Image (tube, helix red, strand yellow):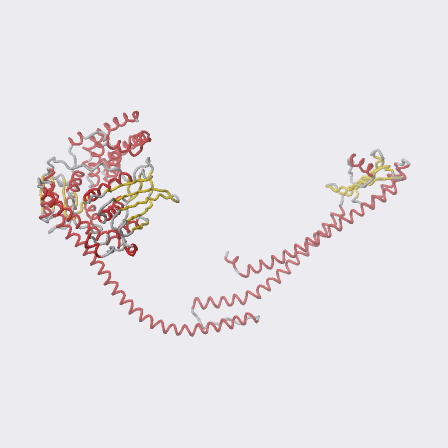
Amino acid sequence: MKWIKTLKFRLMMTMMGLVLLTILIISISIVSNQRQAIERQALQDSTALAELLVTNTLSALLFDDAASARQSLEAVRVRSDISQVMIFDDEARLFASYKNNGIDTLPDNDLLRRVLRTHAPLLIENDQGLQLMIPMTSHGDSIGVLYLLDNLASLRSQLSDFYRVVTLTALLAFFASLVAVLWLVSLFTKPMNEMLATIRDITIHRDYKRRAPKAATVEFNQLSDSFNLMISEVQQRGQQLETMNVELEQRVQARTEALETALELANEANRAKAQFLAMMSHEVRTPLNGVIGFAELLKLNDLDDEARENVQLLNDSAQSLLALLNQILDFSKLDADKVELEKQRINLPAFMKSVVETNRAKAERKGLELELALYDCDADYLGDPLRLRQVLNNLIDNAIKFTHKGHVKVSLLAEQNDREHWLNFEIEDTGAGIPENKLETIFSPFAQADSSVTRQYGGTGLGLAICAQLIKLMKGFYGVQSRENQGSLFWFRIPMQRLDSLQPASKPRQAPVRQAKANGNLILLAEDNEINQSVAAGMLENFGYQVKIVSNGLEAVNACDKRHYDLILMDYHMPQMGGLEATALIRNSRGQGLNTETPIVALTADIQDGVEAEFRHAGADDFLIKPFSIEQLSSMVGRWLIKSGDEINNAPVIDEAVLDEIRRMSGEQAPALINNIVELYLEQTPALIDDIQHGAQNGDAERVFRAAHALKSSSANIGAVKVSEVAHQVEKLGRHNQVEHVSPHLDALLECYEQARLNLKGRLGEN
């Protein structure tokens, strides 16, 4: 359809449209005038004939001589278009008539009487033709009416002949115009097409020796001459450019080689920087783990006040060093765009209270009042709680650090704007404030109000820079309002998706973290650093566990071949054999080893990207970064120690705390929500158990793993603790392709589910 857009087509359509419009206007005007003339002539002829007949038949009507009247009417026979002539007396009765072509219709009697009454002729034109009613008068009195019907056949015949002549003339004019238009268009487009062909050939083949041909018109000849002159100039400049290009290519090649060398050096520097940061992190975290660990262990002893204060100072100093190290690494990751946000359900009131309570001890030590104000935010939102907590903790910590008296107020306002939900956070303090000339740079890396700040309060100036980058990553905005010696107000606002109270969480609800209890479990600790060995072993033995220590991965593999362990803690970097290889060997014994099902938790100070993924791919179940606190280690050990059959049997059928949490979050809608969740759980669980059973029978480890994982999560969400624990054990068997060991767990799974089903069915009526 490209031809529709061509100039030739559009010129032809425009000119032919004008010609056609002109012909139509002229034809319509001629036809209209001619029709009016013929109609007037027909009316005049019919009227004259009617008046003549009135004159000829008036005496016959006066003397009541109908035969004479009919004889006079017969004279119209020569007019074939006269269909009917009738004479009516003064009472509108038919006196005499003439009919042609068998037409026998009488005019309307009321019309006849009106003509008699008014003495005025009446003209009517309808489908039958032209009807004339002329009064016949004698001495001013109406003595009758002459009715004449003209079928207008002659008129229509004349018009038809005229239409044919006009149509034929218009067609001849149209085709003559078409020929003229084609000639005119070709006179314009032919030289243009030749010019375009020349341009296209020069463009495609780069043949600058080609010239445009001469044309038949002066204007196009001038265009060709100008074009040829331009091509000659282009050809000359092209030759000059070729010479310059050769020189530029040589320069660009030399510059490119220099840039490639510089880029390689820069990349090498970046790699060295990343390796240095990773190595520095690992090397610093390893002894730092010992410092924090021993400080944690010392706090467990019965110390006097001075010793306890010294231990607390030691622990605080180590934590400050760890925070500084984390800030440097976070800034490096943010600078390299390697930080990704997670999406988890956040209950804002509980979250904000937790953040504030975490910082309350620091505020109270300085005699400050730490306030929390929440406005219109009693709901759950979808966001990254870790990064949001990091921003809030940094801003609150700064506010406490720079405030000597007064208060620190944390405010949160939720609002909806343009179909988006925005959270507005404010941290207000009554501290030292910031000079106005420093406000623009306060969020820049390594920037502080002045050098005295570092001397008086410490810090690197990275905290606010990290906050700014995290807020941008969350697609938010930030700012500060402050006056020197009058306090500061730091604010930021971020968009977050609001979750309805009935909407399920984006991730399965996890069971609350439990503190590890002494139960005599045997734990294998693979760690090459003697300090870290002492720290971890001391913490674990304090919990009441038995600990077997090995110094490298090879010793760990050999130890796993000799006896069963309830949990394995595996370091990453060790001599002779590292933690990755040792984990893979323990997991890949294909059911022949004693510890193929034993949970393995990676303990490492190496936080490079990909380390956790490598460990999990090798078969590790979880990951704990050094240095860790005694609470973190306790939580991790308590999470992964496999419960014995007695422990599972002693566990509650339904954890009331889970249902209470659902009630708390749902308010008045809690009964309906719990009923819906229970019904959905009871409907879906049998199918998941069937999938586990069929997967075990068919050796389909993937099917067993998926079904057990779904059953574990759904059971935990509703508080079915026993079912969740058994499903967790089955999930591990499926993950490690050990479906032949699933069958012994099926009976326990069915029994636990039956207990949960009966318990939950009883609750449907209560809710």
In the rendered image of this protein, does residue 202 appear above or below residue 1?
A: below
In the rendered image of this protein, does residue 49 appear above or below residue 169?
A: above
Q: Is residue 553 visible to the viewer in this orientation of the structure?
A: no
Task: Tell which of 357 and 94 is nearer to you.
Answer: 357
- Horizontal relation, residue 706 to residue 113: left or right: left
x%, y% of residue 491? 30, 48
The extreme right residue here reads 63
Q: Is residue 161 visible to the viewer in this orientation of the structure?
A: yes
- Horizontal relation, residue 391 to residue 52: left or right: left
Give the quadrant of the C terminus.
Answer: top left
Quadrant location of residue 359? top left
Task: Tell which of 765 and 256 is nearer to you.
Answer: 765
Quadrant location of residue 524? top left
In the rendered image of this protein, does residue 695 appear above or below residue 171?
A: above
- Horizontal relation, residue 620 to residue 678: left or right: left
x%, y% of residue 298? 10, 43
Residue depicted at 76% across the width and 43% down the height: 130
In the rendered image of this protein, does residue 332 appear above or below residue 631?
A: below
Task: Tell which of 677 and 635 is nearer to you.
Answer: 635
x%, y% of residue 739? 20, 38
Number of numbered discs visible in the structure rendering: 0
Quadrant location of residue 569? top left
x%, y% of residue 748? 20, 30
